[in-house]
Amino acid sequence: MLTSRRQFIKMAGGGVLGWSIMPALPGSYEPGDLAGVYDFPRSSPELQGVSSRAISQFLAAANASGISWHSFMLLRHGHVVAEGWWKPYEPQFVHSLYSLSKSFTSTAIGLLVKEGKLDIHSKVVSFFPHDLPAAPGEHLQQMTVRSLLTMNTGHAKDTMPAMRASKDGWVRTYLAQPVEFEPGSHFLYNTGNTYMLGAIVYQITGQTLEQYLTPRLFQPLGIVGYDWEVSPQGLNTAGYGLRIRTEDIARLGQLYLQKGRWNGESLLTESWVNEATSYQTASQVNNGDWSQGYGYQFWRCTHGFYRGDGAFGQFCIVMPELDAVVAVTGQSPDMQQSMNIIWDHLPGGMQGNALPEDAAGWAELKKELAGLGLPVAKGSVKSGIAAKLNGMNFIMKENELGVREIRFGLTDKGGEVGVRAVSGATSLKFGWESWMLNDVRGIYVLGMNDMFPMPSRIAGTATWVGEHELQVNVRMVEGIFGDRITCVFDGDTVKIGFLNSVAETAKNKTEDMRKGLEGKAAR
């Protein structure tokens, strides 16, 4: 049976780069927001019983895997012993979590339980008397909050696609879906379930997830600059859509590792942490680390670990017996491969006591961490037609992207592609065979669909793959994806093709759904 994550990744391969025009959201960061936020103590790995050379071996395997890793952080005994970002990703940027957002929603439920405002055995229908179908089925009436938490609601397919497609409210659409199985008897990974948890938070408190969690979780943990997508009804999407920094992912993991305690205060009860992260239900049979069981929006792992995870390789991995947390972001076509690389190299490099200092190994590891970067295409940084193209405008033929005009600015230091479209205008700056970060959050107007509406800062790199062919690669550094833009010049005409990073890296190759552009130089 396909999980909703797999269905989502399959859909994403066809064109995931549609970014709608949005204003900056509440919580959008400014660089000054970082002051005082990064307060985990730092340590050499060996002082915390971790081998620097084991971490180096992990990095070597990660870089050789073909996976696009974006960030990595390892905590041991509450200390950061290794952290790195693959350029153009940087530590101050938020990153899309996808389904790792579910673990934050589960935490909100745990907080409600701690406050005595919710019993997870309460019936779901009791919270939504005005959104129920005319004749609620028996299975729907049996469904509890715990059913939502454990993905055992009885649905035969994920309800979220129907909810997103509906012109009716998401809650009402969810409650109208068939519930084929008795709740508690059938595991199905269903993102609609998590949205309903967020809707229950709102029914009880009158607050969205973001509003409710801010004073109870985000502020105590020092998480700032976050944002969270919302449904048409104004509620946070709950099962996806949260963006935070890598260190903030580690903060959630450390909170759970410490059984809900933070700075001497019990934010969550120990009993909730134990329940949420333990085996509550069978999950996906014969599917690697997804077959180890499921808790309350947390997955069990091999080795006795547990994790929150999100599509394309967003991980918050907690290793209780090793007193360690691993936070990872990236774009992986094979999340099991990502976990296998972690399992193969990190746990075995941890010992119970401090290790003898390894100055050479630690120095080499620091060098490796500082030098991480996504590969850039290599061709030539010069072309005989570059001077002619500099400042040239091309009027584009009618196209599905609504692009009207494209302008090229090319210098020895780098360049930019200016795009004017029906949906807006943007400028994509790039370095020659090196990443250049655009100055502000931008709208990517060369995408299709409205699957990823959150704005992002964008980084670009370019090379000449032929005398008349310019390749520009861009990355949405506050998201996951990128795009390869190929521009072929012939006299006063240009043809532009696209290949988004999911289609490019998927195990089962897919074509980009965009048809490309054609234009002629303006006179």
Image (cartoon, grey):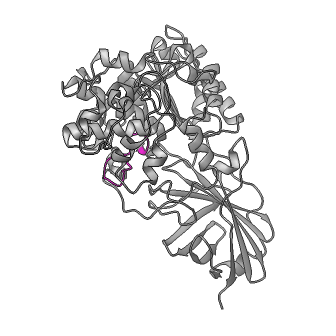
Does residue 482 lie above or below 284 as drawn?
A: below
Whole-percent x, y for residue 392 in the image: 65, 81
Whole-percent x, y for residue 186 in the image: 49, 24
Q: Is residue 41 visible?
A: no
Q: How many marks?
A: 0
Whole-percent x, y for residue 483 in the image: 63, 57
Question: Which region shows up in magenta?
Answer: 226-242
Q: Which quadrant would residue 109 be assigned to in this image?
A: top left
- Residue at image point 59% right, 20% down: 346
- Residue at image point 35% right, 34% down: 105
- Residue at image point 24% right, 20% down: 264
Does residue 463 lie above or below 330 as drawn?
A: below
Question: Along the line of sight, which residue is nearer the eye, 409 or 152?
Answer: 152
Residue farthest to the right?
A: 466
Q: Main secondary structure of the magenta part?
A: loop
Does residue 40 lie above or below 465 as drawn?
A: above
Residue farthest to the bottom?
A: 523
Question: Along the line of sight, which residue is nearer the eye, 291 or 179?
Answer: 179
Whole-percent x, y for residue 279 in the image: 45, 16
Q: Is residue 522 visible?
A: yes
Left-right relation of 521 to 421: right
Does residue 325 lie above or below 212 as drawn?
A: above
- Residue at image point 42% right, 22% down: 184
Question: Along the line of sight, which residue is nearer the eye, 190 or 326?
Answer: 190
Tell whether position 283 is magenta: no
